[in-house]
Image: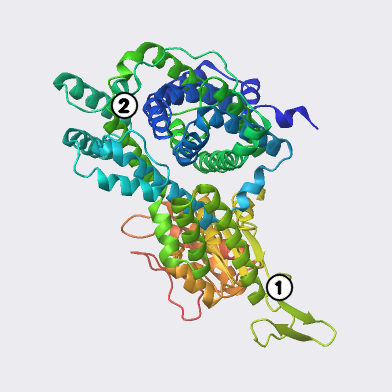
Amino acid sequence: MKFNYWLPRSIAIVKNGYSLSNLSSDFMAGATVAIIALPLAMAFAIASGVSPEKGIFTAVIAGFLISFLGGSRYQIGGPTGAFVVVLYAVILKHGYDGLVLATIMAGFILMLMGFFKLGNIIKFIPYPVTVGFTAGIALIIFSSQVKDFFGFPIQKMPAEFTEQWLLYGTYIGQLNYYAIAIGVVSVVLLIRLRYLFPKIPAPIVVIAASSFVVYIFGLPVETIGSKFGSIPSTLPNPTFPPFSLEKIRAVFPAAITISLLVAIESLLSCVVADGITGDKHHSNKELIAQGIANIVAPIFGGIAATGAIARTATNIKAGAFSPISGIIHALMLLVFMFLFSKLILLIPLASLAAILVIVAWNMSEFHHFKAIALKSERNDKIVLFVTFLLTVLIDLNTGVQMGIMFAALLFIKRMSAVIDVKDTKQNFTISFEDEDISSQPDAYALANRVIPSNVEVYEINGPFFFGVADKLKEVLSFVKSSPEVFILRMRNVPMMDATGFHALEEFYVLCKKANTQLVLSGVSSRLIQKLERFGFTNIIGLKNITSNIDEALQRANEILLKKEQEKFYASIKITKEGATEEQKEKIIKATKTILAEILGKNVSDTIVAVEEGIELKKDENAIH
């Protein structure tokens, strides 16, 4: 196996050339992300049931290793909201030592996944399952923050969602109105600052302002200092947890859940980064880096870590050039911990709760949840709600497992409705839908059709479901240059699930970025109805959804002609008074040339071009 295959992205980029200007860009991006990561790391740690410094330790150690060893150019690692549910439950059941052991075991599982090149398998998790468990986690995070947001004097919180709300009911008469005021103002500031001043790190502004107010006026609210005492200003010495075969067996299910979460979250973050920048991550390198980070971070007093989508996006927007920005982010956090450890103690827990409430809302992706719940077909709705409800009411592990199982079973059921058995000798077809399917030559084969050089035609054969949706996203990378028009033939697509639609929507966005017009061909009336429910027909335009390849090619020719005419008109600069005689002749000649290139033959007919304020010849038999 080639050594370069496993070479970390950071080393590969530096080897290819790394200048002082690149370092300057990475430094600014890393410092920006560190400012945002500091309050989030503490908030996620507290919500997970550990002291705030453990979140900082994780962001420093895991953040450094993920950026240094990973397969993504822009990934930022650290604690995230996805782990809050799992980590809190593990600590209640097995203690912090049990969490450390489970996280280390998860790290080894992730490394094995990377070495055996299982990075792409994560892509086969159905989209409704991902949305369902993400929304479930978001709701549980929100539920866990009600205590600090309303200032309830609860000493020990249960991990179960229903038990949490039953407990809140018994404390409803013990509201802390100072904490509520801080929480509400913090939420309003976080929302307003995001829209008014998007470049300012709102979480830092909120915790600085709330800490100042609480300290100056001596408000009776719980702070990091009053709850946790002092926090260290340096990293702790490495400590290995006690373990036994019995302990390993006890925490093994939690290790599986953590490793699955790390893989999904980190690779999803990489995909988001690739979508923003056009880069392409190495999934197996990334899994190995995540595994090493989750082995080392707990040894230095940390918790589970993964790629953080929001911080990764911030890193890109701040102008990061390479993974060095992530390394700088980790080092800056270490500096902040050393310099501001005493000031951190003044932060009120209500403001951290407000930050996590906003994180939970953003994490829920409510618009995607709503789209599947209202517009998708029944099977996708079942998978979504099963995953969501089981994640909230039972646990994340059960939610994901049952969601995938339901998706697989419902997929098998759908396949039985679209697969047919054909006797080629007797030309007889048996359909599971009891429809009479006749065998005939392919009337829409491309063999006798002219495909312009700047038009690409690809075809999907079979159900457009979660198992093949990811392939569509990679299609443009195989095309040598971005075509003017991309025709996607769907005549042999009997069904499409929510994951398939999501992939189609993402593919449309990729085409739009590449200045390529997407045209769908052979779309059945049943699929058109589904696209209408999802609102995709409004996005792509009904004229770009055709019933067969001839209509699609005709539409492609119209697009090409329009684009060429726009370029030509821009080049000759026609005035408001109209075209000169010389320009009229140029228009006729150019249009003939354009049509000849598109149609693949000479055009001798009279051509009429009509533009605003321009009229050439009038001829009823002319080509317009």
Q: Callout 2: few (<14), some (14-19), or many (20+) C-alpha neighbours within 10 Å?
A: some
| Quadrant of res 371 | bottom left
Residue at 51 percent across and 42 percent down: it is: 272
Check disc 1 and report the residue beneath it: 445
Asked whether the viewer can see residue 586, the reply is: no
Q: Callout 1: few (<14), some (14-19), or many (20+) C-alpha neighbours within 10 Å?
A: few
- Mark carried by residue 204: 2
Residue 148 in the image: state x and y as whole percent.
29, 35
Please identify the residue farthest to the right as the structure is shown: 425
Residue at 58 percent across and 62 percent down: it is: 406
- Mark carried by residue 574: none
Front in this rendered view, residue 166 or 80 = 166
Q: Secondary structure at mark 2?
A: helix
Q: In the image, what residue type sits under mark 2? A: Ile
Residue at 63 percent across and 71 percent down: it is: 413
Residue 419 in the image: state x and y as whole percent.
69, 75
* Between discs 1 and 2, the one toward the N terminus: 2
Residue at 57 percent across and 42 percent down: it is: 257
Front in this rendered view, residue 583 or 7 = 7
